[in-house]
Image (cartoon, grey):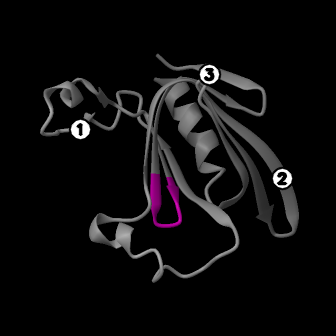
Amino acid sequence: MKVNKDIQKLLNNLWGATIESIDFQLISDKISLMLTINDNEIITKNKLEFCEISSYYYLKDTAEDRFNLEEIEKIDYLELTSIDYYPEGIGMIKIIGEKEWIDQYYSNANFALEIWNSLLFIEAKVLILDKRIFKLK
């Protein structure tokens, strides 16, 4: 249990960071973020990696607002507004479609990244923060 609290404590330090880059590496099942934190003129750079990813799901905004792309205030950077770790997952994310084959796709993300009003859910077995490796599942 302590490891889970340690992970969340480390992630809490990243809240409000500027996302300098985000790289989706589908072949190697990895998402990498380069982050910059400006805390009273003290600049810290961090590399956050999600490895052995089995799923991710991105939502631009809430409910119907996700379609109002022109109405969203134009900004020139991304902020990692919050990031949370859920050791048991957030709950089932499942596609329900008219075709039977689609029902076999589901996941249970263990990370939720809030980027401004958007959400990125990630299901990963390994988290790396600046060379500190956490095996999760």
| Residue at mark 1 to residue at mark 2: CA–CA distance | 39 Å
* Identity, as a three-letter code, of the amino acid under mark 2: Thr
Local secondary structure at mark 1: loop
Q: Quadrant of residue 50?
A: top right
Residue at (62% x, 22% y) in the render: 134
* Residue farthest toward the front in the current orientation of the protein: 99
Q: Nearer the viewer, residue 21 or 44?
A: 21
Give the magenta-colored segment's residue range. Answer: 114-119
Give percent across and percent down for residue 94.
24, 35
Residue matched to label 2: 44
Horizontal placement of 135 versus 76: left or right? left
In the rendered structure, the answer to whether residue 55 lies left or right of residue 44 reads: left
Query: Is 66 placed left or right of 94 in the picture?
Result: right
The image shows residue 6 at horizontal and vertical percentages of 58, 32
Element type where label 2 sits in the image: strand
Question: Is 118 inside the magenta-drawn segment?
Answer: yes
Q: Earlier in the sequence, mark 1 or mark 2?
A: 2
Q: Amino acid at mark 3?
A: Phe
> Main SS of the magenta segment?
strand
Residue 43 image offset from top left, x and y in percent: 86, 59
Name the foreground residue: 91 vs 24: 24
Q: Which residue is mark 3?
A: 134
Q: Which residue is mark 1?
A: 95
* First-in-chain label (3 vs 1): 1
Quadrant of the snapshot with the N terminus: top left
Amino acid bearing label 1: Ile
